[in-house]
Image: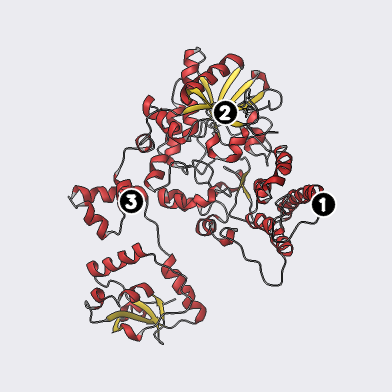
Amino acid sequence: MKQGIDNQPVGKVQWVDRNTLNANDYNPNFVAPPELQLLKTSIIEDGWTQPIVILSDNTIVDGFHRWTLSKDPEVSQMTDGKVPVVIVDFDKDHRMMSTIRHNRARGTHAVLKMSEIVRKMKEDNLPDKEIMERLSMEEEELERLLDNSGMTIRGTKQVDGFGKSWVPTDKK
Amino acid sequence: MVVLKKREIETNVYQSALDRFRYLFDSFDKVVVSFSGGKDSTVCLNLALKIAREKNKLPLDVYFWDEEVIMPETVEYMMRVKNDPDIRLKWLCIPVKHRNGGSRRDPFWYPFDPKCKDKWVRDIPDFAITDIKGFKHGHTIPEVSHLVYDHTHGRIADVRGLRAQESLTRFRAVSHRVKDNWITAARSGYSYGVSPIYDWTSSDVWLAPKIYNWDYNRVYDVLDKMGVGKNEQRVCVPFGEEPMRGLWQYKVGWPELWAKMTGRVSGASTSEKYSRTQLYGFGGIKLPKDKTWKDWFYDNVALYDIEQQKFILSNVRSAVGNHINLARRPVPDTTPDDITGLSWKGLCMIALRGDMKGRRLRTMSSHADPEKKKLIDQMRLKDETRY
């Protein structure tokens, strides 16, 4: 256990050139294009809010995708190609566990709460296009979150009447 | 048994269903609705109410298996149904046996199991029925549903929302004969399972509450928001082999309920993460080096506890027996046999997923040569269950 404020890695953030870091060879975490775009938007709009976690040999334990994005000209020019890092000293198994924990120890966004949030943004007159861009949402997602008409309406679009009834037949 | 073809008739599904309900109320001593809170049983409930009113047979008898792990919207909807003065509801909280597909260690779970009260995700409502005469530990719902209303009521029509559109098995279940195709043989001589909306599609099922302004379970609106398509939306117990692939829906839709579910049965959070991956036999499986599929089948079976091993092995033994009778040769290791469709590779899949109902065992013949397949079809339909 890392006891006391002075011993917390986040207290010793350093800025280093991105090109001095390297990826680890076991990372099980994949980030799909929409989330990668969201991560980029997050860095550009919110700035760097969290350091990349590395070993003393500059191998990345957590933050591989932020590091990848730091190559992007838009992101790179914000800090002259430098990225914030904290250095940890973990053995082989501990570092793999640390990678898993950084990625997995997180919650999920409840759909009804998301629906409420998006509705509040609409009340603040944010245009759909802006919400979609800044949150990496497809039109489909936004439309579902905003539409409260219920399944009797949504489940019967393009349905103009009851279907024909049928019975089994033994005739050819 | 044969599987017949469909023939469209002039009336629409709504009129046909009403006629079927009229027939039920006229020719049975009692009509009861098996109600799950799902969209199909909502249709059955409202059609039954309409005809019960027409024939002056109110209140309508309805029974509900409360399976503990149910969404708050389902509980709220059930309370509204319970409070309808035209409905006489039996709300059943009974520890019936359910499959837990996520765990080899605990392949079954029991809602409101008295042995693990500290883990329940909900309490038993004070008005619920907690025992029925004849129920014993280990019984599943199909084994006891005829005991909810016993023989003293005379001939009972037990209404289910089964629809042919849902699966091939369900289509077959209502396509065996021309007359009364939607009525099963009597259970214990008095309880008939009936499926009066067998020909409805999911569009019909949503059109009816829209037109007639029926109340429904708002779980569906949440599932729709999450992007679950109208034919994939299910309201059912969550831990079975098929339903567990939808466990992510609880996580996104009902995170507070999900938090309790992770501690309710073993394997819940593992199967939420991996139920659609190789860990549970999906997406193709890889044979370890230096092993045959037959070896690996036995390796996998050995991971279950003794009772489950017995069950799986007895199912597989009868399948292999049938294979020998029909094909007169040993079960091939990799390539499905062209007469029976059986292979040790296929059986491996079953061992990995823990096919407790033997359902996949019966569908293996789809790998057989279509010409030769007819043979095994006849064999298989003999033991098709109809619940």
Scheme of image coloration: secondary structure
CA distance separating discs 1 and 2: 40 Å
Q: Amino acid at mark 2?
A: Ser
A22 or A6: which is nearer to us?
A: A22
Residue at x 80% of width, y 51% of height: B324
Residue type pointed to by label 3: Glu
Q: What kind of element bears circle 2? A: loop
Q: Are marks 1 and 3 in contact (CB under 8 Å)?
A: no
Q: Position of residue B214 (x, y in %)?
A: 40, 27
The disc numbered 3 marks a residue on which chain?
A
Element assignment for label 3: helix
Label 1 belongs to which residue? Answer: B328
Secondary structure found at label 1: loop
Amino acid identity at mark 1? Arg
**Do the residues marked 3 and 2 share a common chain?**
no
* Left or right: residue B378 compared with residue A119: right
The image quarter in which residue B93 lies: top right
Nearer-N-terminus badge (1/2): 2
Please determine whether, in this image, residue B298 is positioned above or below residue B221.
below
One can see residue A83 in this view: yes
Q: Answer yes or no: is residue A114 visible.
A: no
Q: Is residue B340 left or right of residue B45?
A: right
Image mark for residue A141 = 3
Question: Quick one: label 3, few (<14), some, or many (20+) residues within 10 Å?
Answer: some
Q: Is residue B349 left or right of residue A40?
A: right
Q: CA distance from mark 3 to mark 2?
A: 36 Å
> Do marks 1 and 3 share a chain?
no
Looking at the image, is mark 1 or mark 2 nearer the viewer? 1
